[in-house]
């Protein structure tokens, strides 16, 4: 069975600074996807970034980037130039990449990020 | 497109009552699923469906029933609500998985706005 662990329940960062959220996972699969979702106070789940396990290059989306270490099963999210609108719960998630019928997501417990003015 | 819609947004039930959480999508997605979100536990999969007439259990299915009579709708039924079912419920949908160039393809899951359910 796959598991996703986020060891930082809460984090705080100053406006315009950089912060890194940690995520580790456990799987015996070779093909899979990893995601970071953002959940602001509105409760809406927003996909921030995804990483395909077969790609060595780390994914980047504007101010958001990941550090994907496949051997270490680590998948951290770096937010550069933090903004007040980044204040949210962030979830790390895993999905098998076996090409099967299911799109099951396995989530971590989340990290609550507060951006301070 | 309205995307994924859920009704109601909020609901309070008494123990033993039954109700149905509604989920609909207008994107012709084959795959639909229900998650529950509890503090300190992230989101956990309750049930999912890969197409009309096909459903299966997720990680935490006990106390919930689902059916999929149409592609658009995937209701979640609580037959006898319990306080342990107090949670925020999310519905999600996506297109069917497949492969592209021999590698597994990815289809983004779209989440509804959630339903906050309280069982007293």
Image (cartoon, coloured by chain):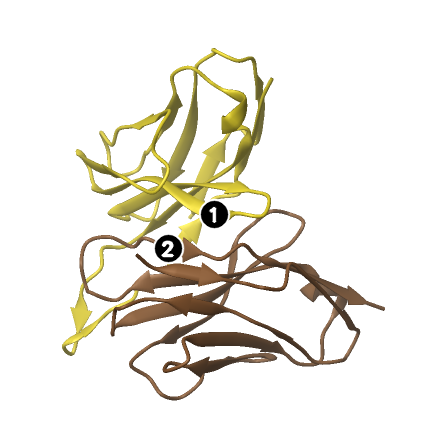
Q: Could you say where residue B51 lies in the image, as x and y percent from the top left? A: 20, 42
Examine the rendering and report whether any part of residue A14 can be seen.
yes
Q: Which residue lies furthest to the right in this view?
A: A117
In the image, residue B79 lies at what x, y percent? 38, 16
Residue designated by label 2: A105
Residue B22, quarter of the rendered image: top left
Report helix, strand or loop for mark 2: loop
Badge 1: residue crowd in 10 Å (few <14, some 14–19, many ≥20): many
Q: Is mark 1 on a helix, strand or loop?
A: strand
Q: In which quarter of the image is the C terminus of chain A?
A: bottom right
- Whether label 1 touches label 2, CB < 8 Å: yes
Residue at 32% over, 34% down:
B73
Task: Identify the residue shown where x is 23% and y is 38%.
Answer: B56
Q: Is residue A6 above or below residue A40?
A: below
Whether residue B83 sits left or right of residue A72 in the image: it is: right
Residue B71 is situated, as x and y percent measured from the top left of the image, at 25, 39
Q: Is residue A113 above or below residue A81?
A: above
Chain at tag 2: A
**Chain identity of mark 1:** B
**Is B107 situated left or right of A44 in this image?**
left
Q: Which mark is residue B43?
A: 1
Q: Quadrant of residue A28?
A: bottom left
User: Which chain does the yellow colour mark?
Assistant: B
Q: Chain A is drawn in which colour?
A: brown
Q: Out of A51 and A73, give the one closest to the viewer.
A: A73
Q: Is residue B107 visible?
A: no
């Amino acid at each position: 069975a796959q598991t996703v662990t986020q060891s930082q329940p809460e984090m705080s960062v100053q406006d315009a600074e950089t912060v890194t959220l940690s995520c580790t996972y456990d799987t015996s699969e070779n093909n899979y996807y990893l995601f970071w979702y953002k959940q602001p106070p509105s409760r809406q789940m927003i996909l921030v970034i995804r990483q395909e396990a077969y790609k060595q290059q780390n994914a980047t989306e504007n101010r958001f980037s990941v550090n994907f270490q496949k051997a270490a099963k680590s998948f951290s999210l770096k937010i550069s130039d933090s903004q007040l609108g980044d204040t949210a719960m962030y979830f790390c998630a895993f999905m098998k990449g076996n090409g099967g019928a299911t799109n099951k997501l396995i989530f971590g417990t989340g990290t609550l990020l507060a951006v301070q003015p | 497109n309205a995307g994924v819609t859920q009704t109601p947004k909020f609901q309070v039930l008494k123990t033993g009552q039954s109700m149905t959480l509604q989920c609909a999508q207008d994107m012709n997605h084959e795959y639909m699923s229900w998650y529950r979100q509890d503090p300190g536990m992230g989101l956990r999969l309750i049930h999912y469906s890969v197409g009309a007439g096909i459903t299966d259990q997720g990680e935490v299915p006990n106390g919930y029933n689902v059916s999929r009579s149409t592609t658009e709708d995937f209701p979640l039924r609580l037959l006898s609500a319990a306080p342990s079912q107090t949670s925020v419920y999310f519905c999600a949908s996506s297109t069917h998985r497949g492969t592209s160039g021999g590698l597994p393809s990815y289809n983004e899951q779209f989440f509804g706005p959630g339903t906050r359910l309280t069982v007293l």
